[in-house]
Image: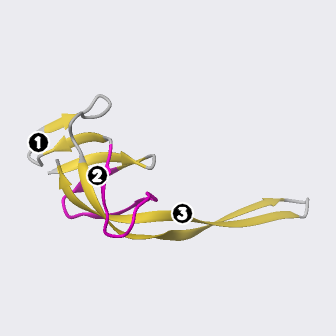
Amino acid sequence: MFAVVKTGGKQYKVSQGDIIDIEKIDGEVGASVELGPVLLTSDGKGAAEIGKPELEGKSVSARIIAQGKGEKVVILKHLKRKDSRKKQGHRQRLTTVEIVSIN
């Protein structure tokens, strides 16, 4: 069984026991959170429920494993013949969660 959930502006295909990195959500390590909205669920045998745009009464429970940051992304802007350069770095804050159940 799997589900597609939307969190942090992105969609994730999850099943029970998966460990994923998502955009930062508030909470302590070990706390339980509900991910949602749930857009689709499937039993893995071909039967699927598709929401329009989301499914009512469905939820995905997860447990926070860690709070951290992702890889550094370097942004470099350069204007030729203008002697203008700008270099920036960015590390996105992430939350690592383990999917406990799909209800």
Count of labels shown? 3
Q: Residue at x 18, y 56 (%)?
A: 101
Judge left or right: residue 19 versus residue 75.
left
Is tag 3's residue or tag 2's residue first in the polypeptide sequence?
Answer: 2
7 left or right of 103?
Answer: right
On the image, numbered disc 2 is attached to which residue?
13
Number of the label disc, if any, that sits on residue 22: none
Q: Counting other residues with Cα less than 10 Å from the Cα at mark 1, is it few (<14), some (14-19), or many (20 or more)?
A: few
Which element is circle 2 on? strand
Amino acid under label 2?
Lys
Question: Relative to residue 90, is residue 15 drawn left or right?
Answer: left
Say which residue appears at 20% left-offset and 64% top-offset.
Answer: 17
| Percent of width and height locating residue 55 | 25, 34
Q: Nearer the viewer, mark 1 or mark 3?
A: 3
Q: Position of residue 18 (x, y in %)?
A: 24, 63
- What percent of the width, then of the height, locates residue 87? 74, 67
Closer to the camera in the image, 31 or 40: 31
The magenta region covers 12-36
Magenta span has 30? yes
Give SS at disc 3.
strand
* Residue 41 occupies quadrant: top left
Amino acid type of the residue that numbered disc 1 sits on in the rendered structure = Gly
Q: CA distance from mark 1 to mark 3?
A: 36 Å
Q: Examine the image and state in which quarter residue 47 appears.
A: top left
Q: Nearer the viewer, mark 1 or mark 2?
A: 2
SS for callout 1: loop
Q: Mark 3 sits on what residue?
A: 92
- Residue neighbourhood size for the residue with mark 2, other residues' Cα within 10 Å, grouped as few (<14), some (14–19), many (≥20): some
- Residue that numbered label 1 is attached to: 46
